[in-house]
Amino acid sequence: MEQSGSDSKPSLLYLIKTFLVVGASSFGGYSALISVVQDRLVERDKLISNKIIVEGFSLASVLPGPVAVNTVTYIGFSLRGWPGAMVSMVSVITPSFFLMIVLTHFYLRYGAIPEVASIMQGILPVVMGIILTAGYNMSKKNLKDWRQLFILAASLAIQLYFTGYFFYILSLVFGGLMGYLLFLRNIPDSRSLMVTTTKRKRRVYWHLVFLIVIVLTFVFQNSEVINLKLAAVFSKISLTLFGGGYVMIPMLHSIIVEKYHWLNSTEFMDAITLGQITPGPILVSATFIGYKIGGISGAFLSTLAIFGPSAMLIIFIADIFRRATNNRYWLAILEGLKPVVVSFIISSLFILFEASSNVWFTFAVSAVTALLLIRFKINYLYLILIFGVAGLLFT
């Protein structure tokens, strides 16, 4: 994979520490998480290029499971192979997992926690500023001429005027097709393929593990042992539902509420709400469901099952895909996908802006955050802490 900066591989400890911080500070859904990754690994540490983020995001978008976590898994894989993928995936969901355990415990004991919502209202504008910064940085480095601006405008129009997974995929297909048609003639013919450093035996071993996971998913989905059933059901969800967090919510409702009756509709929406106001991926709501049904062990198995199998799938695909990333056809398609990813980031700002309770405060804090990040490279964690406390005190 292409890297920017040093050719030396980062340590697994670096990946653990980095993605723990990313997972603890990525409020606001997949766009926020990817924006924080872009700020940390591309802008600050200069460890990877935007190309890797676009590749990972594009693959994650057309495969089942949570988009942001699978993108992080792809980045970890591109840096340190299977071990890097696994520690990156686990690290980025760990902060949300533990916070969700605490919130679920208090929710089941005392009901809703309004203080958490107040903190989120303070953090939300900072998150929007982080996303705005990521959109600016990716646009500056990746949008080179009118062709990409045209793709950006068209994709953004699709995102703003239509909703649903079909139009989400349509944007990616449109961007890839336009990239192929508009950029292929500018890329010299090259037969070189990216050589993987992963040993064949190790690939076979991990692919075997992935196949075992699939088999166990179907073996235990009718188990009388509730925790095994939780793991099997969430593994199946991980491998069969497309579109990421918000797109998967209605499908999750039909499975969790209507089919298995593990939660009622109110509890289900509260689980989704807690997933929204915690950092990291919204599908950490599986932790809530697992905790309510099977305690700590149920929460652990449900969380691992909703994220693990789809993460393994993207590595399974990436192990094949990465060998051809220097192919001129893929490079042309990638030029078209870059503005589509930027359009997803921009459109997420409109969604988050609608969730704000104070328009002018949100606009001002978002603008100041973006200015501080772009101009002065200030650490966004300080801003999250400051405005989180402000939200608790004043909202």
Image: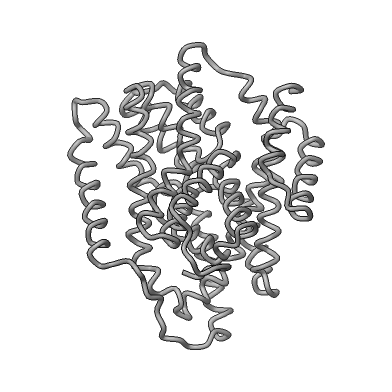
Could you tell whether 331 is left or right of 27 in the image? left
Q: Can residue 243 be seen in this snapshot?
A: no
Residue 378 coordinates in the image, percent (x, y): 73, 48
Q: Is residue 380 above or below residue 265?
A: below
- Residue at 60% x, 46% y is 32
Nearest the viewer among 27 and 235 is 27
Q: In which quarter of the image is the C terminus?
A: top right
Q: Is residue 293 above or below residue 360?
A: above
Nearest the viewer among 344 and 258 is 344
- Residue at 55% x, 63% y is 48
Quarter holding residue 47: bottom right
- Residue at 47% x, 54% y is 71
Quarter holding residue 94: top left
- Residue at 68% x, 60% y is 137
Residue ranking furthest to the top: 110
Q: How many marks?
A: 0
Q: Can residue 253 be seen in this snapshot?
A: yes
Q: How is the image coloured?
A: one colour
Could you tell whether 198 is left or right of 339 in the image? left
Residue 14 coordinates in the image, percent (x, y): 49, 51
Could you tell whether 320 is left or right of 282 in the image? left
Residue 221 coordinates in the image, percent (x, y): 23, 35
Q: Is residue 347 above or below residue 251?
A: below
Could you tell whether 52 is left or right of 308 in the image? right
Nearest the viewer among 280 and 157 is 280
Residue 385 coordinates in the image, percent (x, y): 68, 34
